[in-house]
Image: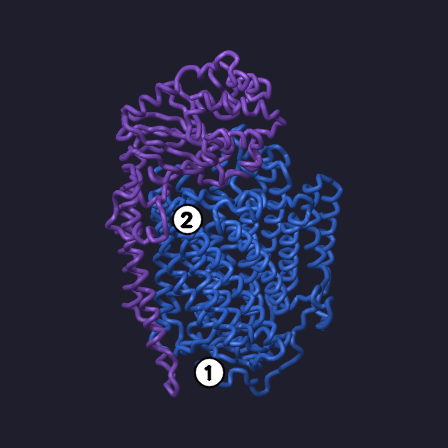
């Protein structure tokens, strides 16, 4: 059973939706962190009040329409102008229901905006048109688009942007929060189960807003440490005379170094850090799988894959492209 | 007496009824354009990875769909009824400022044309930053083309039209009521027009200021919304939503007014709790000012601000709920005639209730953080603005069509229209609740098949095309009944208000004798209302002359807008000269001929 199907089988919403297919990797109805669960519990409380009012109003409306249809020869109805007691009653009733919604709402607002725990793992999230940069300051690591976090440990995302407003949203792990120029925002959560969660930018941020996707890999503590260790240091060195070395030369010759960092080779900061790009499962902000074929397609024509992409389409000899792809794939 | 025939008479008319018809047909054409844009959007989203349109075009389509529906379709369709019906309901011979009224209409048309002209230029640089145009995406740095210029200049012009109309209707309703029509005898539609007009004159200055600042940022290098010199993009969000939320009530209150007229007529019962319904409308108008930050819960304003705006938002549900219960009580115990107009009014209650309930869901900030900027909110706004406003407006069309044209729309086609639209609307928008909760953000031109929302999206697209079909049925109905429809007479429905005491369509001066009103429902409580009292001096009814100057003055505004678009200074002087000449000649033109 995939992780996002484990809980909440008592509530009908996921059940109804199961009939429409699935699985739903980006569903807000399958919360897998403390933060996401508290939002979900609140939503379900409100949902049932809404169902109650919905059934009440719509069935009353149907009843009235059937009961008071015009009948031939009926007398003109009695002209009632109002009824004070009734009107006070249906002013107070919704107000009372709202109390039952407002109190848990306020509680959740404050509970979910607490300062992060002392042992929280701090990660800086920086939005770019149209990809995500992640920095792990304690470990000195910079990566992109695929976030790795340990299960069961509080995570403190410190979010900001390099250009326009974006919004970080991984529904399984919690609600969204905007990345705003000149502001630093925060999302804190503790992931509760291992698995990969997808998400994407939720605030319209320009031409390829739809292609600004992300992944969060929630890993066991040991797997996370292993990943962390693998991301440090230099990129893998290419053997002399190998195709990877030709690829590294192409990486320099075609000017990729101006925008991309590969530690030990280049120091560009405009595009994603590629020091360990070969270890990611997707490329181009989650739009393509990280395969040789997809990489060649992406490098061959970035704006063709991702409209408006800042990475230009370069006239590249096929041999160079093949070598470059091999080089990038070797950067595990 | 002004000309009443030929195209010139339409360009120069100051008759509120003709201006109402102009508003109606112009807005309806924009409604069709906005609908067409929606259908292309739905075609693109029918399956994942579709390639009906490019990303760039898609972004322009959803921007223009929203902008068109809000500013060029729904507001002016309401304005069509303000124009045509309000003077008749209050027993007046025209609005307070007939030439200003013509000016409003022409400014609206020209602003709408300017906005849409962007589609026709090479590379179609239509606005592409969303109808909400969040800074700093709208800055020169991130939107170098003329797209945003068209948007902000178009909206500035439309704001002038709305403001002029707002003042006009406030003065009209406060000053031109027939003798005896106290405020608490005012028909609810006219009441809601008054509240809406106050919202317009207070909300539009805010967006005007916001747009002026944006204009300065884009054309003169200031940094109101840019952090580079200490500005803040969040300022735009505050200003936009301080306007934007009252704007929601500008869109819904007129429809609520229409429903409050239609239900009593077809239940043969007075509106239940008139006073409460009116005060609820006024209260909604006031409370609409205190809730804007509920559009900004994901901005991170902090727990205190979130709590306050959450509480004020939830409170608005109270007067809204009160209205729904009062409408239900109006129908209770009545003799309900199931006309097309009543179908649409009842549809309004059924659908608006759903929109109201999802509204309460995102009034709760933590819940909203999973909903905002997703299709869940797209579902919500369409239940409110389509299920609410559009259904309300169609109720008004079927109800007042005979008054405006002299002929009834066909009832059978009307009901077909209703059922197609009702089913289509629910198919199109109900699945969007799930699409959003399953993780699909709004404003994306494509989505991954892995999301698992392809089937739901396909259902939604089918629903959208059903809505399109229902609009065709309406147009066929209009076409078929234009000559062969049942003749209306003064009052085909047995309505209670003053507009039903005069011929359909009414003569240019509306009332031979201004009626004296002694009750809230003059037609139901008095017979002989139209009879001319013995010995009354009839005289020559006040006959407004046509005028070219409102049209001329209105033409100055788009010319002024062309100056920044073309970066040419002399065009600005030309535009100003046209505007000033128009106003000057208008001011010195004798009003009555």
Residue A153, given in percent of the width and then of the height, sits at: 27, 28
- Mark 2 neighbour density, 10 Å: few (under 14) some (14–19) many (20 or more): many
Left/right of residue A38 with respect to residue B588 in the rendered view: left
Q: Residue at x 58, y 71 (%)?
A: B476
Q: Identify the secondary structure beneath mark 1.
A: loop
- Residue B67: x %, y % from top left: 55, 51
Which quarter of the figure has residue A167? top left
Q: Is residue B183 visible?
A: no
Q: Please name the residue that numbered disc 1 is placed on.
A: B526
Which chain is home to disc 1? B
Q: Colour of chain A?
A: purple
Vertical position of residue B309 compared to residue B423: above or below: above
Element carrying mark 2: loop
> Which residue is found at the position 42% from the left and 72% from the top?
B263
Q: Chain of mark 2?
A: B
| Image spot of residue A145 (x, y percent) | 43, 30
Q: Colour of chain B?
A: blue
The answer to which of B442 and A258 lies nearer the viewer is A258
Mark 1, other Cα within 10 Å: few <14 / some 14–19 / many ≥20: few
- A235 displayed left or right of A108: right
Residue B589 lies in what quarter of the image? bottom right
- How many marks the image carries: the answer is 2
* Residue that label 2 marks: B453
Q: Residue at x 64, y 41 (%)?
A: B146
């Amino acid at each position: 059973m995939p992780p996002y199907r484990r809980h909440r089988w008592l509530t009908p919403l996921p059940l109804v939706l199961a009939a429409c297919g699935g699985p739903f990797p980006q569903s807000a109805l399958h919360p897998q962190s403390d933060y996401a669960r508290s939002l979900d519990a609140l939503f379900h409380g409100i949902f049932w009040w809404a169902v109650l009012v919905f059934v009440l109003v719509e069935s009353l409306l149907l009843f009235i329409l059937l009961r008071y249809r015009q009948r031939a020869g009926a007398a003109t109805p009695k002209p009632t102008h109002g009824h004070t007691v009734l009107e006070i009653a249906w002013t107070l009733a919704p107000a009372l229901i709202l109390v039952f919604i407002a109190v848990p709402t306020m509680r959740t607002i404050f509970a979910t905006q607490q300062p992060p725990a002392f042992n929280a793992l701090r990660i800086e999230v920086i939005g770019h048109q149209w990809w995500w940069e992640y920095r792990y300051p304690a470990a000195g690591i910079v990566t992109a688009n695929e976030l790795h976090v340990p299960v069961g440990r509080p995570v403190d995302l410190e979010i900001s942007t390099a250009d326009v407003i974006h919004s970080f949203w991984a529904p399984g792990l919690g609600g969204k929060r905007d990345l705003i120029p000149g502001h630093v925002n925060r999302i804190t959560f503790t992931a509760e189960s291992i698995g990969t969660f997808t998400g994407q930018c939720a605030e319209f941020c320009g031409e390829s807003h739809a292609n600004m996707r992300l992944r969060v890999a929630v890993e066991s503590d040991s797997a996370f440490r292993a990943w962390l260790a693998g991301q440090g240091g230099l990129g893998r060195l290419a053997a002399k005379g190998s195709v990877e070395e030709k690829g590294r030369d192409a990486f320099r010759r075609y000017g990729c170094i101006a925008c991309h960092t590969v530690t030990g080779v280049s120091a560009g900061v405009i595009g994603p850090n590629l020091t360990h790009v070969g270890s990611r499962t997707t490329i181009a902000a989650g739009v393509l799988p990280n395969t040789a074929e997809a990489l060649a397609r992406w490098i061959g024509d970035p704006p063709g894959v991702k409209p408006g992409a800042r990475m230009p389409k370069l006239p590249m000899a096929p041999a160079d492209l093949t070598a470059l792809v091999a080089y990038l794939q070797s950067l595990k | 007496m002004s000309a009443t025939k030929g195209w010139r008479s339409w360009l120069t008319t100051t008759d509120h009824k003709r201006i109402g018809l102009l508003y109606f047909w112009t807005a309806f054409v924009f409604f069709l354009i906005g609908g067409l844009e929606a259908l292309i959007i739905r075609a693109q989203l029918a399956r994942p990875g579709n390639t009906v349109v490019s990303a760039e075009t898609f972004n322009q389509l959803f921007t223009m769909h929203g902008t068109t529906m809000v500013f060029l379709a729904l507001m002016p369709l309401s304005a069509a009824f303000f124009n045509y019906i309000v003077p008749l309901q209050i027993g007046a011979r025209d609005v307070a400022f007939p030439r200003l009224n013509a000016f409003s209409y022409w400014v609206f048309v020209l602003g709408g044309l300017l906005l849409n002209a962007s589609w026709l230029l090479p590379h179609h640089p239509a606005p592409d930053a969303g109808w909400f145009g969040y800074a700093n995406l709208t800055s020169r740095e991130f939107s170098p083309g003329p797209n945003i210029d068209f948007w902000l200049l178009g909206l500035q012009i439309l704001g002038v039209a709305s403001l002029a109309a707002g003042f006009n209707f406030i003065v009209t309703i406060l000053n031109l009521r027939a003798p005896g029509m106290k405020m608490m005898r005012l028909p609810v539609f006219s009441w809601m027009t008054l509240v809406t007009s106050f919202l317009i004159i207070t909300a539009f200055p805010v967006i005007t200021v916001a747009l002026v600042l944006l204009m300065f940022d884009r054309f003169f290098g200031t940094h109101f919304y840019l952090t580079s010199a200490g500005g803040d993009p969040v300022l735009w969000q505050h200003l936009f939503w301080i306007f934007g939320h009252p704007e929601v009530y500008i869109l819904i209150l007129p429809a609520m007014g229409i429903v409050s007229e239609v239900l009593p007529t077809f239940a043969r019962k007075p509106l239940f709790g008139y006073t409460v319904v009116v005060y609820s409308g006024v209260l909604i108008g006031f409370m609409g000012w205190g809730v804007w930050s509920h559009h900004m819960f994901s901005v991170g304003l902090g727990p205190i601000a979130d709590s306050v705006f959450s509480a004020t938002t939830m409170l608005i549900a109270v007067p809204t709920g009160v209205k729904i219960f009062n409408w239900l009580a109006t129908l209770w115990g009545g003799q309900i005639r199931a006309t097309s107009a009543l179908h649409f009014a009842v549809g309004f209650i059924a659908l608006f209730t759903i929109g109201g309930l999802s509204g309460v869901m995102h009034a709760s900030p933590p819940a909203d953080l999973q909903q905002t900027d997703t299709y869940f909110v797209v579902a919500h706004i369409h239940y409110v603005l389509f299920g609410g406003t559009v259904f309300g407006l169609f109720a008004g069309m079927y109800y007042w069509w005979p008054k405006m044209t002299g002929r009834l729309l066909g009832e059978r086609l009307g009901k077909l229209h209703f059922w197609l639209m009702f089913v289509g609307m629910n198919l199109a928008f109900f699945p969007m609740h799930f699409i959003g909760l399953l993780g699909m953000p709004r404003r994306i031109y494509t989505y991954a098949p892995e999301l698992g929302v392809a089937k739901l999206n396909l259902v939604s697209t089918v629903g959208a095309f059903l809505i399109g079909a229902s609009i065709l049925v309406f147009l066929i109905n209009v076409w078929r009944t234009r000559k062969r429809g049942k003749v209306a007479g003064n009052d085909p429905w047995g309505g209670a208000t003053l507009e039903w005491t005069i011929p359909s369509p009414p003569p240019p001066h509306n009332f031979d004798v201004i009626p004296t009103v002694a009750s809230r429902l003059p037609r139901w409580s008095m017979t002989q209302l139209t009879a001319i009292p013995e010995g009354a001096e009839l005289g020559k009814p006040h006959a407004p002359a046509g005028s070219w100057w409102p049209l001329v003055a209105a033409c100055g505004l788009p010319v002024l807008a062309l100056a920044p678009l073309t970066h040419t200074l002399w065009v600005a002087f030309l535009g100003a000269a046209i505007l000033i000449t128009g106003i000057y000649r208008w001011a010195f033109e004798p009003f009555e001929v």
